[in-house]
Image (cartoon, helix red, strand yellow):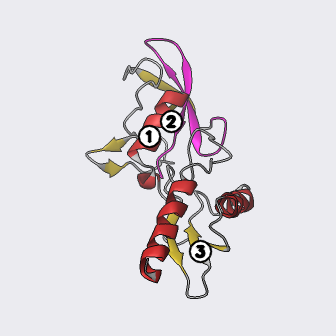
Amino acid sequence: MTTATASAGRAARAWAVLDGVPDPEVPVLSVRDLGMVRSVDLAGDGTLDVVLTPTYSGCPATEMIERSVIEALDAAGLGPVRVTLRRAPAWTTDWISDDGRRKLREYGIAPPVHAAGEAVPIRIVRGATAPAPSCPHCGSADTEQISAFGSTACKALWRCRACAEPFDYFKPI
């Protein structure tokens, strides 16, 4: 096996391991589901370089996520590992994978709404409108916002008029 082949295999195994590193806020999602893992490369010194973009620049869980990534890769025998945090470009909900969006719905959180394939920006101006999310419980589009703030700053609280269930909506950014 060539060195290049071995390096590619190690990086591929690292990507697979990162599928199992949960986000501390929404543990049904992995750091890969959220699109936080920007790259995995093998450095010249043999260190596995992982580049992460936090979902929020001031996220209090950033250090925990970084530590979880290192621990998971070390436990899989893929170390040594170096994590670099890259905050630009800023993370966007566009980076959430289709599988991640499915997992959010199944977990009871409405994923960010996109219009015609484009992200819908958060509106702070009174009276601004954006497409309403569908209910993750019954699928109805007849929903209403209860509060602009949900269980965390990145979510809003909504209610379904059809099944009357409240749900969090992952705000698009």
Residue type, mark 1 in image: Arg
Alpha carbons under labels 2 and 3: distance apart: 30 Å
Q: Position of residue 10 (x, y in %)?
A: 52, 69
The residue positioned farthest toward the bottom in the image shown: 44
Alpha carbons under labels 1 and 2: distance apart: 5 Å
Q: Position of residue 70 (x, y in %)?
A: 69, 64
- Front residue of 1/151: it is 1
State the image quarter where residue 139 is shown.
Answer: top left
Give the residue pinned by disc 3: 48
Magenta segment, which residues?
Answer: 150-173
Give the residue pinned by disc 2: 104
Q: Is residue 102 left or right of residue 124?
A: left
State the image quarter where residue 69 is shown.
Answer: bottom right
Give the mark nearest the N terminus, 1 or 3. Answer: 3
Q: Is residue 165 visible?
A: yes
Q: Is residue 117 left or right of residue 113?
A: left
The residue positioned farthest toward the top in the image shown: 163
At a point 44% along the width and 72% down the height, the residue shown is 8
The residue positioned farthest toward the left in the image shown: 116
**Marks 2 & 3, CB-CB < 8 Å contact:** no
Residue 165 magenta-highlighted: yes
- Asked if residue 118 is positioned above or below residue 3 in the image, the reply reads above
Q: Position of residue 25 (x, y in %)?
A: 66, 44
Tag of residue 101: 1
**Marks 1 & 2, CB-CB < 8 Å contact:** yes
